Amino acid sequence: MYKTIRYELKDKVARVTFDRPEVRNAFNWDMIQELFHVFRRIKEDESIRVVILTGEGSCFCAGADLHWMGGVMDMPFEDNYREALELADLFYLIYSLPKPVLGRINGPAIGGGTGFVSICDISIASTEAKFSFSEVRLGLIPADISPFIFRKCGENLIRPYFLTGKRLDASLAFKVGLVNAVAEPDELDRVVDEYVQQLLAGGPNAIKACKELLEKVPLMTFEGAREYTARVLAELRKSQETQEGIAAFLKKRKPNWVE
């Protein structure tokens, strides 16, 4: 049902693949709309516990399709603004998804492609992956992706790469915090699966609450965080999931959300 992406669901794990290998999985308006559709679908499907985001072929995502961008540049300002807002909304939809998103970074992630890396909760990069905020070399800036990059890496570490467009290899991307692990190409799927299994071991509602915590607490005052965290903890303690998790631990058995 999709033309620019591929969607698969198996054993509570959804897999979304950028599927335009002929243009190195660059995104265009059609892909943005299809990603909206599939991630809204994933958000509402309670059977899905983990999401893997990856690219077809040897590239993760080469950023915006420049043929599409050329057409966008000829559009009136209001239409340009609307499309930029749509892309920002897509990034936030994936970032705030109440299920963990695991980035399988199988190859280069350039420009807006690094934005998709930054909105993943955990990203595992192949040693063959390369990263670049190349927008300034085209007379543009990494605008929509910047809030997520700053959160993931911090302004000081990422500032030189925003300003110069200099490329990062996988090891440097790990050092600045853009990715969480690096693996040889033939080990990538094994490492991704290890993280998938670890995520499936957590309580679904606990992980949802944890994602909300990670998003909200950094923006709060200490007083606001004090009230919020105490309330969330009290609610979880009364939940069936928490009671099941503690009972399973005490009885030395697996909780009912682990098969």
Image (tube, rainbow, N blue to C red):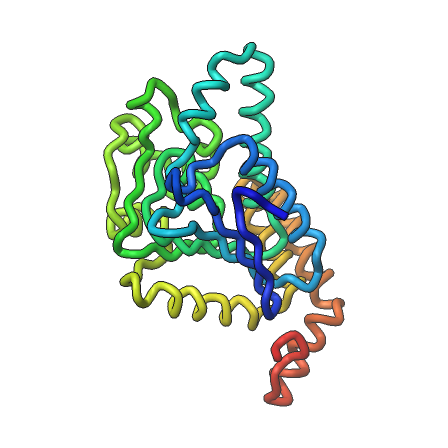
Residue at the (25%, 42%) spot, across then down: 168
Residue at the (68%, 71%) spot, across then down: 242
Q: Is residue 8 above or below residue 80?
A: below
Residue at the (49%, 45%) spot, across then down: 119
Along the viewing direction, whichever of 9 and 100 lies nearer the viewer: 9
Q: How many marks?
A: 0
Percent position (x, y) of residue 88?
A: 55, 32
Q: Which image quarter is the C terminus in?
A: bottom right
- When asked about the image quadrant of residue 222, the answer is top right
Percent position (x, y) of residue 130?
A: 28, 45
For the view shown, which residue lies furthest in the bottom direction? 251
Q: Is residue 191 above or below residue 248?
A: above
Along the viewing direction, whichever of 197 and 38 lies nearer the viewer: 38
Q: Is residue 92 above or below residue 98?
A: above
* Residue 157 placement, left or right of 86: left
Percent position (x, y) of residue 116?
A: 46, 43
- When asked about the image quadrant of residue 64, the answer is top left
Percent position (x, y) of residue 212?
A: 61, 50
* Residue 181 placement, left or right of 128: right
Q: Is residue 86 visible?
A: yes
- When asked about the image quadrant of residue 89, the answer is top right
Residue at the (37%, 34%) spot, across then down: 111
Along the viewing direction, whichever of 64 and 85 lies nearer the viewer: 64
Along the viewing direction, whichever of 226 and 145 lies nearer the viewer: 145
Q: Is residue 118 visible?
A: no
